[in-house]
Image (spheres, rainbow, N blue to C red):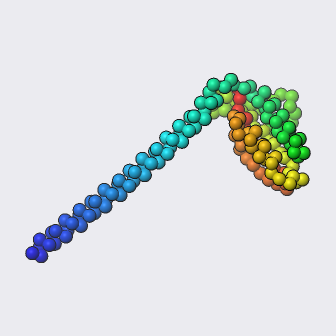
Amino acid sequence: MKRITLIFVITLLALIVLLWNFISDTRTLNRGIKSATDEISQIKKEQGTLVKFKSEKPLTLEKFYLEVFNDIKEISFYYRAPSEVKIIGAKDLVGIRNFFKESQYKGIKYVDLLSSFDLRKQRDTYLLDAFYKMLKSRPLDVLDVSVEKGIVSITLRLYGT
């Protein structure tokens, strides 16, 4: 009787260990499926945002630079905040094409801009809100933001043809 009980207990323990492994494998599989589903939905979301740019006429980088330059100057003038917008590495704006570089995307070029705002006399942050809304729907990246002694410096990368 002792041997039968011992065999039964060992068999029961082996079944419990196998069941535990099966359950942990199932949990791992479910986590993998959930993460893959999340990644797929993220890719579909990015694809949806890119589709709206697909039908747009490509904007030349010179025109796009001038648009961004004028918008930044207009926002800073409206909020009475001194600002400076310049192409990184450029001393004058005579030959801005020399600063255009090929991007990782086929047929697309980019240029890096440095935009600085003096916020020492500003009581609120509406200037930055307006700046963010202006940048939100445009083909550009914000590379760096720094604040030093009340001056906000934002490095932008503009994309165009």
Q: Is residue 141 visible?
A: yes
User: Residue 68, relative to residue 3: is it above or below?
Assistant: above
**Direction from residue 141 to residue 24 in the image, left or right:** left
- Residue 146: x percent and y percent? 77, 51
- Residue 124: x percent and y percent? 83, 53
| Between 78 and 149, the one nearer to me in the picture | 78
Which residue corresponds to the image point at 63% horizontal and 25% vertical from the top-left?
55
Quarter of the rendering occupied by the N terminus: bottom left
Quarter of the figure with residue 104: top right
Which residue corresponds to the image point at 28% horizontal and 60% vertical from the top-left?
19
Which residue corresponds to the image point at 86% horizontal and 28% vertical from the top-left?
94
Quarter of the figure with residue 71: top right
Which residue corresponds to the image point at 62% horizontal and 30% vertical from the top-left?
52
Total labels: the figure holds 0
- Residue 87: x percent and y percent? 81, 37
Seen from this angle, which residue lies furthest bottom?
2
Q: Is residue 153 visible?
A: no
